[in-house]
């Protein structure tokens, strides 16, 4: 599949609330794609291992405080620092499965006081545009049954409910290929759904140029 000369990989993003199963589904998707002969790799944002990522990690673990604009821009910088590698991989035919992207960035920061959606999007304008954005939608009872919140910043019902509303605003942008997945179903069903949509996205993207987000 993807290793044919001149054919690029697809950029596939998973978004959704806490405990929607994003990380699990991202891992299952990469495995399934590889099994089917595609080249695929996973990545996640924030990527906590870089220098910028360590600042973000410490902020999320509440070991440090950062001014709200500053942390927003660090999250964005943490994406930009991966862009050269991402483009290189996509160009060489590798499909990237990304656990959270700019949509998390905008959805979370814009819930803070005195931040609007427009400002929040600017730092991420021009990032590689996802060919497919899978929004994992889980009903609150199912999410609650999967366990409680952790102790990181933002992990409260109050904040997460506001974040969800922002995601739905972002999904109204029809220039992006959003697909809402019912993530309350059992893992295997969710996986099959995601795999089918992803294979289609890979086929559709392979001879299309990579776009730029929000441009
Ligand atoms: N988050 C994530 C942001 O606030 N902005 C961003 O740009 C990104 C990518 O960080 F609460 C938030 C979302 C979540 C936390 O948690 C990261 P996970 O569990 O590592 O995804
Ligand atoms: Mg988390």
Image (tube, rainbow, N blue to C red):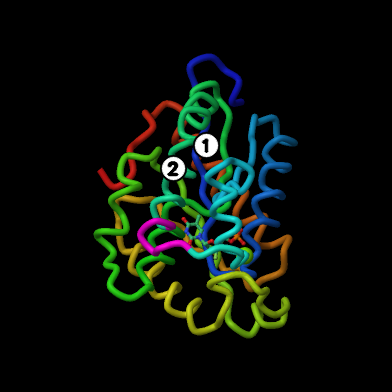
Q: Are dots 2 and 1 in contact, CB under 8 Å? A: yes
Residue 214 appears left or right of 27 = left
Q: Which residue is mark 2?
A: 131
What is the secondary structure assignment of the residue under circle 1? helix
| Residue under the image location 24 percent in, 60 percent down | 118
| Residue under the image location 58 percent in, 43 percent down | 97
- In the displayed structure, would residue 63 be above or below residue 42? below
Q: Is mark 1 within 8 Å of ligand 1?
A: no
Residue 175 appears left or right of 4 = left
Pinpoint residue 78: horizontal percent, then vertical percent: 49, 44
Q: Quadrant of the C terminus?
A: top left
| Crowding near the residue tagged with mark 2, few <14, some 14–19, many ≥20 C-alpha atoms within 10 Å | many
Pinpoint residue 37: horizontal percent, then vertical percent: 69, 30
Q: Quadrant of residue 70?
A: bottom left
Dividing the image into four quarters, tell me where ligand 2 lies: bottom right
Is 137 or 186 nearer to us in this picture?
137
Question: In the image, which disc is placed on residue 113?
Answer: none
What is the secondary structure assignment of the residue under circle 2? loop
Question: In the image, which disc is placed on residue 202?
Answer: 1
What is the distance, in whole Å, between disc 2 and disc 1 at their CAs? 8 Å
Of mark 2 and mark 1, the one earlier in the sequence is 2
- In the displayed structure, would residue 146 be above or below residue 75? below
Pinpoint residue 154: horizontal percent, then vertical percent: 53, 72
| Crowding near the residue tagged with mark 1, few <14, some 14–19, many ≥20 C-alpha atoms within 10 Å | many
**Residue range of the region highlighted in magenta in the rendering:** 66-71
Secondary structure character of the magenta stretch overall: helix
């Amino acid at each position: 599949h993807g290793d044919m000369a001149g054919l690029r990989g697809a950029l596939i993003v998973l978004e959704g609330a806490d405990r929607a199963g994003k990380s699990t589904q991202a891992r299952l998707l990469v495995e399934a794609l590889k099994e089917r002969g595609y080249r695929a790799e996973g990545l996640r944002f924030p990527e906590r291992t870089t220098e910028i990522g360590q600042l973000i990690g410490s902020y999320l673990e509440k070991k440090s405080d950062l001014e709200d604009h500053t942390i927003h821009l660090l999250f964005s910088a943490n994406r930009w620092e991966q862009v050269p590698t991402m483009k290189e991989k996509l160009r060489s035919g590798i499909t990237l499965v990304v656990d959270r992207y700019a949509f998390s960035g905008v959805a979370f920061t814009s819930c803070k006081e005195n931040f609007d959606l427009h400002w929040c999007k600017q730092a991420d304008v021009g990032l590689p545009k996802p060919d497919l954005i899978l929004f994992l939608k889980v009903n609150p009872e199912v999410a609650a049954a999967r366990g409680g919140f952790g102790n990181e910043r933002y992990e409260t019902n109050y904040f997460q409910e506001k974040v969800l509303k922002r995601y739905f605003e972002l999904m109204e942008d029809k220039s992006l290929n959003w697909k809402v997945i019912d993530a309350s179903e059992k893992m295997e069903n969710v996986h099959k759904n995601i795999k089918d949509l992803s294979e289609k996205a890979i086929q559709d993207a392979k001879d299309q140029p990579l776009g730029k987000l929000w441009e």
